[in-house]
Amino acid sequence: MKMARYQSKRTDNYTMVFVRRLLTGDLELLALGESVTKCNANLINSDSVKPSAGADAKGFAVFSDGSGNQLECAYSFSRSTGRDDGTCADNQRNTYRLVFD
């Protein structure tokens, strides 16, 4: 499993540094009871994230680099601490662990 690193955010547009490629994309933040399947995931089972104790939100993100590389992430986290984790997959069949620390 490879690592993807979240870089910065100001709005719902995010930037990822991903295996020496710059990816940009959007995310959708949902309540724990909402289904992520409405986000039209193609690379990952978007409802596969099992929220950990203390998590009060989950989300789904789609990133691309504009030249064919795509990454999708499903995750959960605590709004009060900003911590938790999730899973990402790219269109080259690689999987990644996403950590909010």
Image (spheres, grey):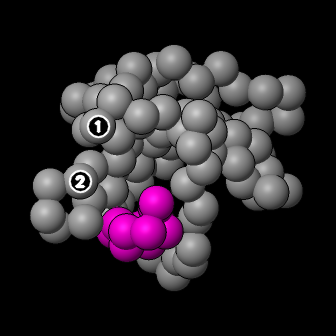
- Amino acid type shown at disc 2: Asn
- Vertical placement of 94 versus 77: above or below? above
* Residue 23 placement (x, y as % from top left): 35, 66
User: Any mark on residue 69, and which?
Assistant: 2
* Residue range of the region highlighted in magenta in the rendering: 12-24
Can you tell which quarter of the image residue 31 is in? top right
User: Any mark on residue 10, and which?
Assistant: none
Q: Quadrant of the N terminus?
A: top right
- Amino acid type shown at disc 1: Gln
Principal secondary structure, stretch drawn in magenta = strand
Q: Is residue 41 magenta?
A: no
Is any atom of residue 41 visible in this view? no
Is any atom of residue 68 visible in this view? yes
Estimate the spatial distance between the alpha carbons at disc 1 and disc 2, rounded to whole Å: 8 Å
Q: Secondary structure at mark 1?
A: loop
Report the front residue among 88 and 56: 88
Q: Are marks 1 and 2 in contact (CB under 8 Å)?
A: yes
Q: Mark 1 sits on what residue?
A: 92
